[in-house]
Amino acid sequence: MTRVNTVKFSLIALVVAVAVLLLAHWIHIDYLYFASYTILQFIVLATAWNILGGYCGYVNFGSAAFFALGAYASVFMHKAYPVPVPLLIVIGGIVSGIVGLGMGYLTLRLRGSFFAIATLALAVVLQTLIVNWDYVGGSRGAYIIRPENITILGLQINYIEYLFALMLLLAVIALVTARTIERSRLGLGFATIRDDELAAEACGVPTLRTKLIATAISGALMGMAGAPFPYYIGYLQPASAFGLEYAVNSIAMPMIGGTTSWVGPLVGAILLGGAQQYATVTISSAVNLLIVGLMLVAFVIIAPNGLVGLVQERLRGRRRS
């Protein structure tokens, strides 16, 4: 039954994605592609963060590190042996997934603030390594010259539209993955670890192995989100790849939407990402972090369990009455 529901959900998600792609192509505003790409990117990052931070209860401050790993894996391959972007996404996912697995093995015996600080330290260490690695640009950064158009099956497609379509597909993959995990035995294992890890271990849940799976999946999805980034931005430097906004938004978006469901990161990313893109056009991108702070404070007061939790509480109240 779960498998059938997953297939149905995947087909519905793909149909919605195709509809969004056709609508964007019909409107055909260049900035719409840039802004929508950023929102889709945050949907993937927020969903990936939620697999470890929301489902398992392990707060990860190293989102930017996994995102940057995917981006710099693309830069490395671009210089060493150029391959198509879809393959770069796979490579970025593998690299970040392996690093996530290693990070988990070293840090998952820690809990709470100690684990969060360890993940932040990972980001600092990786950024230091990248800054001193001249092959991928080092502190100077690296230019990625993308073509104006790409030919697929005889059709010429604008390259930004092509990247938008890839990120849209990646968002669908991330959401389907999160929903499948949430409704599986693995998801139940994540929930028991979040609620009471000692009790879960006493009941026979292999907690370390389960958490390692979470870190690997979470890291892989973040790396896949970062892989097309050099082609999107055109110039990659450590300050942009390891930007604070990736770590902050990856945490804030699930918290605003709700961390116990796959819907939460989606709602939070659309709401917060849309507000940031609107502010970028009308005011300045400098206020983006201010928007995150204000919305976090507002939702902590109004909806401590996120928008999804607030809606669920209202529905329960109506059923009781």
Image (cartoon, rainbow, N blue to C red):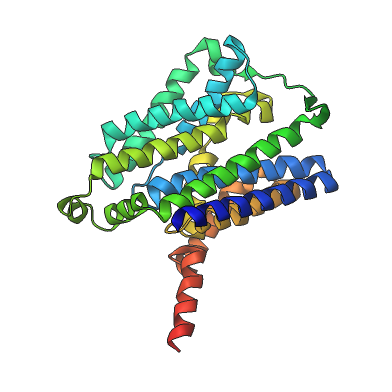
Q: Position of residue 198 (x, y in %)?
A: 18, 52
Nearer to the camera, 164 or 114: 164
* Residue 23 appears in the picture as rendered: yes
Image quarter hosting the N terminus: bottom left
- Name the residue at 54% across, 10% down: 135
Establish if 97 lies above or below 288.
above
Q: Looking at the image, which residue is at 72% across and 19% down?
A: 145
Is residue 3 rendered to the left or right of residue 35? left
The percent coordinates of residue 102 (x first, y second) are 33, 28
**In this view, 302 is above or below 239:** below
Q: Quadrant of residue 245?
A: top right
Residue 64 visible to an observer of this rendering: no
Position of residue 312 relative to residue 178, above or below, is below
Q: Quadrant of residue 103?
A: top left
Q: Nearer the viewer, residue 182 or 252?
A: 182
Q: Quadrant of the C terminus?
A: bottom left
Q: For residue 294, which quarter of the picture?
A: bottom right
Q: Is residue 61 above or below residue 102?
A: below
Q: Looking at the picture, how far across and down is residue 238, in whole percent?
A: 54, 25
Extreme residue in the bottom direction: 321
Looking at the image, which residue is at 53% across and 49% down?
175
Residue drawn where x is 55% and y is 43% of the image: 173
Figure disc tally: 0
